[in-house]
Image: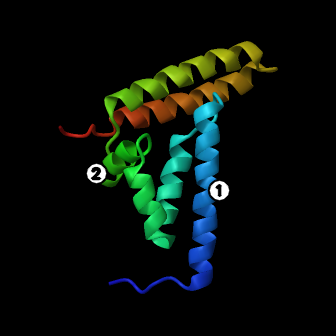
Amino acid sequence: MARPLPRVARWLLLAFAGLCLVLAVIGVILPGMPATVFLLMAAWAAARSSPRLHAWLLGHRLFGPMLRDWENGHCVSRRAKWSAAVAMTFCAVFLAWTAPRPWIAAVGIGCMAVVLVWLWRRPEPQG
């Protein structure tokens, strides 16, 4: 069994979890800002600092299923994959339309393409 973290480390991780949770909520509202990454980081930090917050995240109506899938085999639902693909497509079009230089758009779109390839290679939850 792992030794418990020092109090300062737990508080820092809890603060990090809170910050990531706020950024995840902003990401749900603000197009182009990733919510999933921040939500996964919040769950990771909460699991190490606050069992109560971690349990709340796992039981949350919106966030819980995705987090449970990730914790049980790093799975991503097909719906989440399609949602990410659609959101990134809109962002790519917007970036291509508004970027001051073509190479800036190419770098951003390339990064999104790499993330989408990685995402679609993740297993899907069974059942």
In front here: 115 or 6?
6
Can residue 102 be seen from the camera position used here? yes
Question: Does 4 sit left or right of 25 as displayed?
Answer: left
Q: Looking at the picture, which amino acid does disc 2 mark?
A: Gly
Callout 1 crowding tier (Cα within 10 Å): few <14, some 14–19, many ≥20: some
In front here: 52 or 71?
52
Determine the secondary structure under disc 2: loop
Determine the secondary structure under disc 1: helix
In the rendered image, residue 93, in percent from the top left (x then y), is placed at 63, 15
Question: Residue 73 got which mark?
Answer: 2
Residue located 76% across and 20% down the image: 99
In this rendering, the count of numbered labels is 2
Question: Does 100 sit left or right of 117 as displayed?
Answer: right
Q: Quadrant of residue 92?
A: top right
**Location of mark 1 (residue):** 19
Question: Could you give the CA–CA distance between mark 2 and mark 1, rounded to whole angstroms?
Answer: 25 Å
Instruction: Nearest to the eye among marks 2 and 1: give it.
Output: 1
Residue located 19% across and 39% down the image: 126
Can residue 74 be seen from the camera position used here? no
| Above or below, comparing residue 48 to residue 100 in the picture | below
Q: Earlier in the sequence, mark 2 or mark 1?
A: 1
Callout 2 crowding tier (Cα within 10 Å): few <14, some 14–19, many ≥20: few
In the rendered image, residue 49, in percent from the top left (x then y), is placed at 51, 72
Residue located 61% across and 58% down the image: 18
Q: Which quadrant is the N terminus positioned in?
A: bottom left
Residue located 49% across and 70% down the image: 50
| Above or below, comparing residue 52 to residue 73 in the picture | below
Q: Quadrant of residue 34?
A: top right
| Above or below, comparing residue 127 to residue 52 in the picture | above
